[in-house]
Image (tube, grey):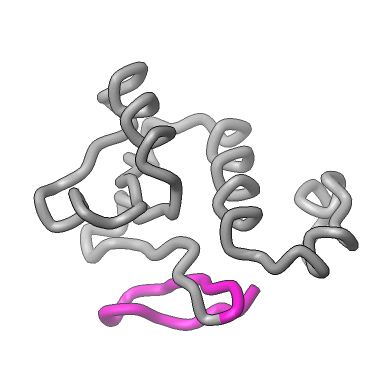
Amino acid sequence: MEEGSAYGTPAFRVRGKLLARLLEDGETLVLRTDFEARDILMQVNPDVFHITDHYRSYPYVLVNLPVVGPAELQELLEQAWRSCAPKKLQDGYRSDDWNREIP
């Protein structure tokens, strides 16, 4: 995963594909997902997940960070990573890698 910026805000990419970025408001995360999962997330929890017209044709969902639970966000980030990461990279992945302490 590469850390960088997109549209002037912090962002993460995998092999050049946008995984997630913070919107300018500092409270909304743009997160890669597929269209079916996005529709389910928005239907089940509209307080946390939504889109704007801008994102309607793109495989992203907007996440309300002050409301989303940490465990749910971690799971969503892992799913987003899996959607971008090449198979070879995924083969070396262990789920406990997401839970390790960052120095």
Can you tell which quarter of the image residue 74 is in?
top right
Q: Is residue 7 magenta?
A: yes
- Where is residue 86? Give x, y as percent: 70, 68
* Image vertical order of residue 42 relative to residue 44, above or below: below
Q: How many marks?
A: 0
Q: Return the residue nearer the eye: 58 or 64.
A: 58
- Where is residue 84? Give x, y as percent: 58, 63
- Looking at the image, which residue is at 84% across and 54% down? 97
Can you tell which quarter of the image residue 21 is in?
bottom left
Q: Main secondary structure of the magenta part?
A: strand
- Looking at the image, which residue is at 82% across and 69% down? 88
- Where is residue 103? Give x, y as percent: 81, 69
Relative side of 14 to 97, left or right: left
Q: Is residue 90 magenta?
A: no
* Image vertical order of residue 44 relative to residue 70, above or below: above
Relative side of 45 to 25, left or right: right
Q: Return the residue nearer the eye: 74 or 25.
A: 74
User: What segment carries the magenta color?
Assistant: 1-15
- Where is residue 24? Give x, y as percent: 23, 65
* Image vertical order of residue 3 relative to residue 46, above or below: below
Image quarter in which the N terminus is found: bottom right
Farthest top residue?
44
